[in-house]
Every structure is written in C-alpha cells, then in structure tokens.
Image: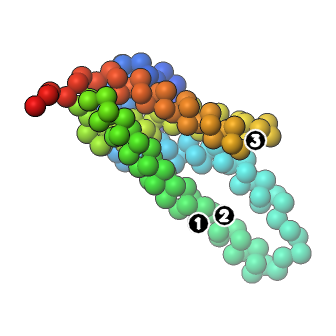
Amino acid sequence: MIDSLLNSFRLPKKEAMFHLNRKGITHTIGYLFLLLAVLFLPDMIGTIIRLESDLTEVSRGLYLAQVFVFYPLLIIFLIIVGVSIFAGAAMVMKNVMGRKLAYQQLWKMSAYASTIPLILSVLLKNLAVSDWISAVLFIGIFTFLIFRMIRIYPKAPTK
C-alpha cells in the first residue's frame, strides 16, 4: 500500500503509471479505502468526542454502530461510484484523444490520479477554504493528471 501511495505521488510519470496499472482491482479498492479512512479519521474521532452526553446508552450505541459500520460502507460505495464517474470522463477524454485504453485501465488510473486531489481537498477543508474552490482544484488537478497519463498511451489504429 505504501508503494501505491508513493507511485501515486509520482504520477503522471510513465514508470509509476505502468507500475500501478499492474496492481489488481482489489488492491486498488483496498488502497482507496485505506486512504479515505486515514483522511477522514480525524473527522470520525472528532464526531465521537463531540457525542452528546445526554444521549441514552441505546442511542449512543446506535450512533457508534453507524460510525463504525455504515460509515466504512458509505466510503466503499463512494469510492466505487466516484471513481467510476471519473473513469467515464477519462473514457470520453481517451476517445477524443484517440488512445488505445480499456475501461479497467482508466478506472485504476482514475483511482490513483485522485490521490493528490483528495489529500489536497482534506487539507483545504481543515484550512476553512471554500468548498467550491476545493472542488475546482480537485477537478483541475485530476483532469491535468489523467490527461497526461492518457497521452502516454499509443494512439488506437485507424480504420
């Protein structure tokens, strides 16, 4: 997992990209899950600390079950849906550029290309930067990285 993180920071370099594309899809999903869990861990801890003391034990137990069970499930769902949407956008970009890539490759490329924008978004959130500025930076950095990564692949043969 550390290897994947380090190679994600090296994107869009060709060696890092090809190394990450050799990883399996389950490794990629696990990497994203761990990354998001670490990034959102301070929020989860803060939520548990600020838990109202006037809640009953049943309410507190249900709340903690939601934090520890449903929150990770939500993260996994958001990973799959979010990266699939980004991969769809990358598919459009690939078609416009006429490159030879499969959707599975684009999905993994999108997953790893979102590492830097995700970390930056969390940092900006903690610095009280506006959400729209964070979103524009996320989309801009992601688009730049995925464009450069797609450009490395050869053009599809013309018919």
Q: Are marks 1 and 2 in contact (CB under 8 Å)?
A: yes
Numbered mark located on residue 70 in the image: 1
Q: Position of residue 103 (x, y in %)?
A: 29, 43
Q: Which mark is residue 130?
A: 3
Element on which disc 3 rests = loop
Q: Assess disc 3: are there few (<14), some (14-19) or many (≥20) residues with their C-alpha within 10 Å of its C-alpha.
A: few
Mark 1: secondary structure: helix
Residue 54 versus residue 10 in the image, above or below: below
Vertical position of residue 154 compared to residue 58: above or below:
above
Q: CA distance from mark 1 to mark 3?
A: 27 Å
Residue behind mark 2: 67
* Residue at 58% across, 66% down: 70
Which one is nearer the viewer's eye here, 139 or 102?
A: 139
Which kind of residue does numbered mark 2 sit on?
Answer: Val
Image coords of residue 117 (percent x, y): 58, 34
Q: Residue at x 29, y 36 (%)?
A: 95
Residue 129 in view (yes/no): yes
